[in-house]
Image (cartoon, coloured by chain):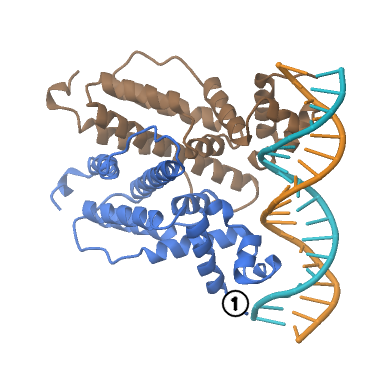
Chain colours: A blue, B brown, C cyan, D orange
Amino acid sequence: MRYQRKDVVERAIDVLDRHGLADLTMRRLGTELGVQPSAIYHHFANKQSLLAAVADELLRRGDRPLPESPWDARVSAICSQLRDAMLAYRDGADVVATVHAFGLGAAAPYDALVVALGDAGFPADLSRTAARTLLHFVFGHAADEQTHLQAGSDGAIADAPRDASDFEVGLSLVIAGIRLQQPTDLHQV
Amino acid sequence: MRYQRKDVVERAIDVLDRHGLADLTMRRLGTELGVQPSAIYHHFANKQSLLAAVADELLRRGDRPLPESPWDARVSAICSQLRDAMLAYRDGADVVATVHAFGLGAAAPYDALVVALGDAGFPADLSRTAARTLLHFVFGHAADEQTHLQAGSDGAIADAPRDASDFEVGLSLVIAGIRLQQPTDLHQV
DNA sequence: ACCTGAACACCGTTCAAGT
DNA sequence: ACCTGAACACCGTTCAAGT
């Protein structure tokens, strides 16, 4: 029963999706792998690194080729893809947000947004600020939605009725705000 | 040494600010109060409720009267005040975000935003979506900033240089996007 | 390279009983 | 109303030692 890093991450995602983040403990994961908890520390320095690897793999699995299209459609596609990737697994938004809060993770979507905005002619400063603003929205919205969905399945009361298009509306607000910052001579590019 | 709910919350904020969220345990708090950990369960059903009360108190302490001004300035003031309240205590953004992720907390700023937007003439649906979009930005930005500040004081490398006006720029992007949704006959109100 | 076994220093929560 | 004392069922992490 010898495992590599990759096997451990795969099993961790399995436990996450079946039992949730609260049950994704080093001890539980060890049991699932048929191994002592301490064995996992041969592959990861600590639980934080394991979670970072899990978050990266979740996002990697959601990776799709982006369409050739105007910058705003590309930005929208990156955000939607990120959202879909997080919602595809139980507590996925939580994991990605936790890892991001620790200062790691989601570097790929961030870079993709900065590039898309830079290509559209926005200055580098604004591109970075706008990219982070978009990520805050996507993370926050996904976490919110996953919490409410889960609260619903737990039998708790869903206090805020959420429309299916709520994400698109919020996203379009932010993108519209970014669009306004374009130099006027680029409005038709 | 008999305490009431309020005393427990105050001491919890004290521990939070001095030692951080990771050290705000029921056992630690009990020790600081000179009481058994189990005694806290007389005042709070569980740790989650305690944290919710802590988050509410943090926001309450940051409460300032809002200026009479156009809707966009009011919205901006609500967001800045929320941000300041979260950053005023160590790990404050983390606490508020955690509580919010659990489906509670930050109801006051949310309601204030919905009212400000509704008064400006936005339809109720859009007001709610815009209010949540703003909260996602403010929470995400504050958590990000607090993480990086703390990483800096821990001696870690601050990977993304953050400008002091970064919050204002991001916030103005979102508000500008909302402004575009105004019915044209209200643009000058 | 990968794992065991045992320990260390903790957690949140419950509950009968006390004042 | 507020608290004690003791227990239950867990955590993440370290480390010498094994193969």
Q: Tell me if residue A11 can be seen.
A: yes
A60 displayed left or right of B157: left
In the rendering, at what x and y percent does residue A19 appear? 52, 56
Q: Observer-nearest residue: A162 or A55?
A: A162
Q: Tell me if residue B73 can be seen.
A: no
Read off the chain for label 1: A
In the rendering, at what x and y percent does residue B68 appear? 34, 13
Is C11 above or below relative to B92?
below
- Judging by the rendered image, the residue that carries numbered circle 1 is A3
B95 displayed left or right of C2: left
At 45% from the left and 37% from the top, the residue drawn is A156
Q: Observer-nearest residue: C6 or B62?
A: C6
* Corner quadrant of residue B124: top left
C8 displayed left or right of A35: right
Category of crowding for the residue at label 1, using alpha-carbon neighbours closer than 10 angstroms: few (below 14), some (14–19), many (at least 20) = few
In the rendering, at what x and y percent does residue B99 appear? 52, 35
At 65% from the left and 48% from the top, the residue drawn is B154
* Corner quadrant of residue A42: bottom right
At 40% from the left and 44% from the top, the residue drawn is A149
A155 displayed left or right of A160: right
At 25% from the left and 31% from the top, the residue drawn is B125
Is B131 above or below relative to B157?
above
Give the secondary structure at mark 1: loop
> What's under tag 1, amino acid-wise?
Tyr
Q: Quadrant of the N terminus of chain A?
A: bottom right
Task: Report how many numbered discs are placed on residues in the image.
Answer: 1
Is A124 above or below relative to B73?
below
In the rendering, at what x and y percent does residue C6 appear? 84, 65
